Image (tube, coloured by chain):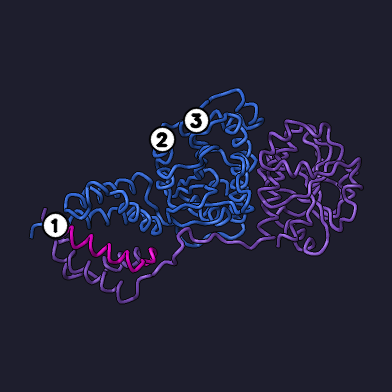
Chain colours: A purple, B blue
Amino acid sequence: MSDSLNNIRVVLCDTRHPGNIGSAARAMKTMGLSQLYLVSPHQFPDKQADWMATNAVDVLENAIVCADLDTALSGVVLAVACTARSREIAVPAVTAREAAARLVEVAQSQPVALVFGSEVRGLTTDQVKRCQMVATILTDASHSSLNLAAAVQVFAYELRQHAVQETIKPTVDKPRVLATHEEIELFYAHLERELMACGFLNPVEPKRFMQRVRRMFARMQLEHDEVKILRGVVRTLRTPKKR
Amino acid sequence: MSDSLNNIRVVLCDTRHPGNIGSAARAMKTMGLSQLYLVSPHQFPDKQADWMATNAVDVLENAIVCADLDTALSGVVLAVACTARSREIAVPAVTAREAAARLVEVAQSQPVALVFGSEVRGLTTDQVKRCQMVATILTDASHSSLNLAAAVQVFAYELRQHAVQETIKPTVDKPRVLATHEEIELFYAHLERELMACGFLNPVEPKRFMQRVRRMFARMQLEHDEVKILRGVVRTLRTPKKR
């Protein structure tokens, strides 16, 4: 799992603003990526990059600066060009999600790369040609320009979701103790009795309303303790406690 | 499809840096989102915000500034709190992807919201309590702090991916008419008042119990009609009808 993330390089080509390199490093680190390659950055290392990286300065310190894309792709078996524009070049074009799935799959055993162009011009035709796949983040057609770091964040996020099949663990440690069928039936019977007694329910036709109530509480997936609480609420609303 | 995106509000609470508001607006616009609500921004409007928004200045111009979260959630039927931290409050916790699926589904017919906290402290407990769901972007455990705009970008991206899918498979069921934020808050206030009056609740410490109640009903995703029913039940249990 984390092995495959370690096999994924993020390659930034011709980046103009060092702040964007820092933001990209931060975006990578949040998703467990660490292999940063910089092809001809205009300004690096740079204080602005460190500043934007916050806790990901180690990613910058370990970044490998290369003179050209071929050097950055050395040893890589699958390189994906990230681009917003549709191009004439007929390499396979896929969504970010599809690219991430493929990259993670291959990265289980061999190095792969995700290649981003400059903030202003994107990737050159020559750079795209050196990749085996072109991937696009699906955006609003009229406004497709993601900030460089934002694009890195989305791809890094997709890579992690594919690499790590995590789920959110319940925030409470102890598992929920759900109410049994009998407990829930006793609650419905109690509620029906009291609604009848207070005049809310028509004694001749209570079924329809209670059916509605059942539907509501079924969605709730009541816990054992919650049934007790609800019954206490109904009891006390009907028969107030002495003060 | 774009209808559901138009029904999704992005609510930024207590944002410190106007540049982050601008970046968030840009992130929204790339994914076709436009409804921005700002709860007590430290500095807005601001040139730095406009600068970072680039082509999304219209999103900033149409942003609605609110004094509190309740105002921003007015009319909303499902509010999702975006948080990196795990919390004691056990409202349903889901991944960004799961939250996006649910938000897009509900937003086909009614307004929903995605709520973000300040860059420094995130959402307060009180703000989270006002939401029905907590969503987390799955990150590397040791480095979970996404920049605010990066988090907005990931959620906006997920929302769009779900909204676009939606055109492929049309929904068959007629949508449920969910209760608005105000309707649900009024129900809680009504219930608390009556539980206090009948002696069920200790007037000194009602918060803990009401928190438990909120948790239960948040799971229920109450409909408009169901809130009316529940309030009728509480009212009549307390004050029986004359025969």
Q: Is residue B7 visible?
A: no
Question: Label 2: few (<14), some or many (≥20) within 10 Å?
Answer: some
Asked if the residues shown at circle 3 and circle 2 are in contact, with their CB atoms under 8 angstroms apart, the answer is: no
Q: Which mark is residue B68?
A: 2
Q: Which mark is residue B228?
A: none
Specify the amino acid type for callout 2: Asp
Percent coordinates x, y for residue A13 in the rendering: 83, 40
Percent coordinates x, y for residue B106 in the rendering: 48, 53
Mark 1 lies on a secondary structure that is loop
Q: Nearer the viewer, residue A45 or B47?
A: A45
Which chain's residue wears label 3? B
Report the magenta residues as a range.
A218-237
Tell me the residue at 49%/56% (across/down).
B93
Task: Give the labeled residue for mark 3.
Answer: B41
- The alpha-carbon separation of the residues under discs 1 and 2 comes to 37 Å
Task: Give the labeled residue for mark 1.
Answer: A241
Which chain's residue wears label 2? B
